[in-house]
């Protein structure tokens, strides 16, 4: 039977988490798993050969989160999946987010994004600089998109593949997620943000960038120019 839901996770020298995620996801019906290997040192095909429901895409060198997301979206479109769900295998509670994402996609939302900060009452474990970064970033992004997001950089998301067919993702790093929301606003997609059961990675993606706020604001400025809501008609 053809499956209608594709989940995607990124392999980047995190094999222990990948194998654990495979064991979790295989318990769900109607779900295929796509692993995008982003330049890992191991042979992912050899490591996952016993799991027949797992698909794979291999980047010979690390291209970044945005390139991996684009690979997943193209794969889901090419093989006619109804929904794509992207997960972070290094989040210990990620599997708990799957049912809620699926329920909301089936309800009719075009994009479901899970916030690692909503309903997270223990802010004492989050660095003040990280909290300030997200306050500054979301304040600017929400003003541009008229959304009310708290955690746009969360990798835990669901996409209705057919209804988001106009999305054109070109940014190769986490800025792709800002590109996603600006285009979603432009095209009038229905977006919902849910609390995530997994949140230990909150802010870790910022460690990849020398000046993340400057980099991400630049993405917003470019996309705001290309997808000007005032020109949609």
Image (spheres, rainbow, N blue to C red):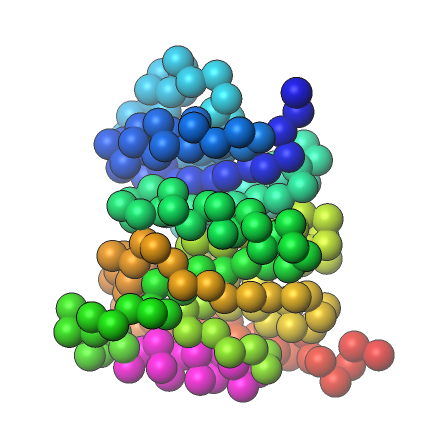
The x and y percentages for residue 10 are 40, 41
Residue stretch rendered in magenta on the structure: 132-144
Q: Indicate the quadrant containing the N terminus: top left, top right, bottom left or bottom right.
A: top right
The x and y percentages for residue 35 are 44, 33
**Quarter-of-image position of residue 42:** top left
**Residue sitting at 29 percent across and 62 percent down?**
202
Residue closer to the observer: 199 or 203: 199
**Quarter-of-image position of residue 191:** bottom right
Residue closer to the observer: 168 or 158: 158
Pick out the residue farthest to the left.
124
**Residue sitting at 30 percent across and 58 percent down?**
199
Residue 171 visible (yes or no) = no
Residue 220 painted magenta: no
Q: Indicate the quadrant containing the C terminus: top left, top right, bottom left or bottom right.
A: bottom right
Pick out the residue farthest to the right.
233
Residue closer to the observer: 95 or 16: 95
Q: Is residue 179 left or right of residue 126?
A: right
Pick out the residue farthest to the top.
50
Vertical side of 128 occupied by 10: above or below? above
Vertical side of 34 occupied by 195: above or below? below
**Residue sitting at 57 percent across and 50 percent down?**
103
Count of all numbered marks drawn on residues in the image: 0
The x and y percentages for residue 73 are 59, 45
Residue 143 painted magenta: yes
**Residue sitting at 45 percent across and 67 percent down?**
152
Residue 90 visible (yes or no) = yes
Q: Main secondary structure of the magenta part?
A: helix
**Quarter-of-image position of residue 229:** bottom right
Vertical side of 40 occupied by 190: above or below? below
Q: Is residue 84 left or right of residue 139?
A: right
């Amino acid at each position: 039977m053809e499956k209608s839901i594709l989940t995607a996770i990124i392999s980047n020298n995190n094999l222990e988490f990948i194998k654990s995620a495979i064991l979790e996801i295989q318990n769900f019906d109607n779900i295929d798993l796509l692993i995008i290997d982003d330049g890992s040192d191991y042979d992912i095909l050899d490591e996952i050969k016993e799991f027949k429901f797992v698909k794979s895409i291999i980047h010979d060198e690390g291209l970044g989160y945005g390139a991996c997301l684009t690979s997943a979206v193209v794969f889901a479109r090419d093989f006619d999946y109804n929904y794509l769900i992207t997960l972070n295998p290094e989040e210990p509670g990620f599997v708990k987010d799957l049912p809620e994402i699926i329920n909301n996609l089936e309800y009719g939302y075009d994009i479901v994004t899970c916030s690692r900060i909503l309903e997270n009452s223990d802010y004492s474990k989050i660095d003040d600089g990280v909290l300030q970064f997200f306050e500054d970033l979301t304040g600017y992004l929400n003003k541009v998109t008229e959304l009310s997001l708290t955690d746009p950089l969360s990798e835990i998301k669901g996409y209705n593949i057919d209804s988001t067919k106009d999305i054109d993702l070109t940014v190769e790093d986490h800025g792709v997620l800002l590109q996603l929301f600006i285009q979603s606003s432009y095209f009038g997609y229905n977006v919902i943000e849910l609390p995530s059961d997994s949140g230990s990675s909150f802010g870790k993606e910022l460690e990849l960038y020398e000046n993340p706020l400057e980099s991400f604001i630049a993405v917003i400025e470019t996309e705001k120019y290309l997808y000007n809501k005032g020109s949609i008609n």
